[in-house]
Amino acid sequence: MIQWSNILFDALWAALPAAGFAMIFNVPRSALPFCAIGGTLTYGIRELLLNFYSIELSTFIASTTIGIIGVFWSRKYIMPRPVYTVASIIPMIPGTYAYEMMISLIAMNNNGVTDMLLQNFIQNGLHAISILFAIAFGLVLPSLYYTKRQQPIL
């Protein structure tokens, strides 16, 4: 059963880190609402799709969605695409998986390598790397498809 209220509530809170990250990198004020909307959309889409797909595939679809929207926003408002898209994916960064991976690594360093620690290290590391690749490819694919080259590559 999909908990619509939880997804909506969490998605609205995801606007804060997206807008905050945009402010840190001096995004123009006119683009801040779009960054917040993008953070809300990406996180909401990912959380909705997590009911049906893996976290990697859900993240890829959400990143591709904001990549497509970012291409159109950048054309409409004549601003570089990363202004909108990079801040929008910040709520989807796999911090928990990376943190758990590092905790396992530190525990292996302090207590010695055990099967459980090694399994946690590898599993969390693969999740974190897979999610990061899903974000990167999801952001890049729409711009490769929709962007027209003005000059030949030579």
Image (cartoon, rainbow, N blue to C red):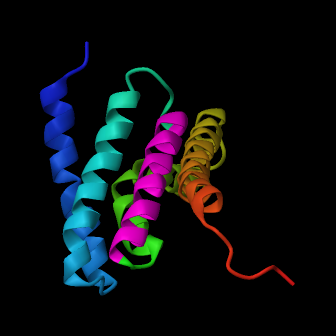
Above or below, 14 relative to 49: below
* In the displayed structure image, the side of residue 7 where residue 5 appears, left or right: left
Residue 60 among magenta residues: yes
The count of marks equals 0
Is the stretch drawn in magenta largely helix, strand or loop? helix
Q: Which residues are magenta?
A: 56-77
Q: Residue furthest top?
A: 1
Residue 122 horizontal/vertical position (percent) = 64, 43
Q: Residue at x 68, y 74 (%)?
A: 149
x%, y% of residue 65?
Answer: 44, 47
- 26 w.r.t. 143: above or below: below
Q: Looking at the image, which residue sits at the far right?
A: 154
Q: Quadrant of residue 126?
A: top right
Q: Is residue 78 positioned above or below 75 on the image?
A: below
Q: Is residue 63 magenta?
A: yes
Q: Position of residue 59 (x, y in %)?
A: 47, 43
Q: Quadrant of residue 19?
A: bottom left
Tell me if I can see residue 106 in this picture. Answer: yes
- Image-based side of 127 in relation to 84, left or right: right
116 and 32: which one is in front? Answer: 32
Quadrant where the image shows the C terminus: bottom right
Nearest to the observer: residue 126 or residue 34: 34
Q: Residue at x 48, y 56 (%)?
A: 67
Q: Residue at horizontal 82%, vertical 80%?
A: 153
- The quarter of the image holding the N terminus is top left
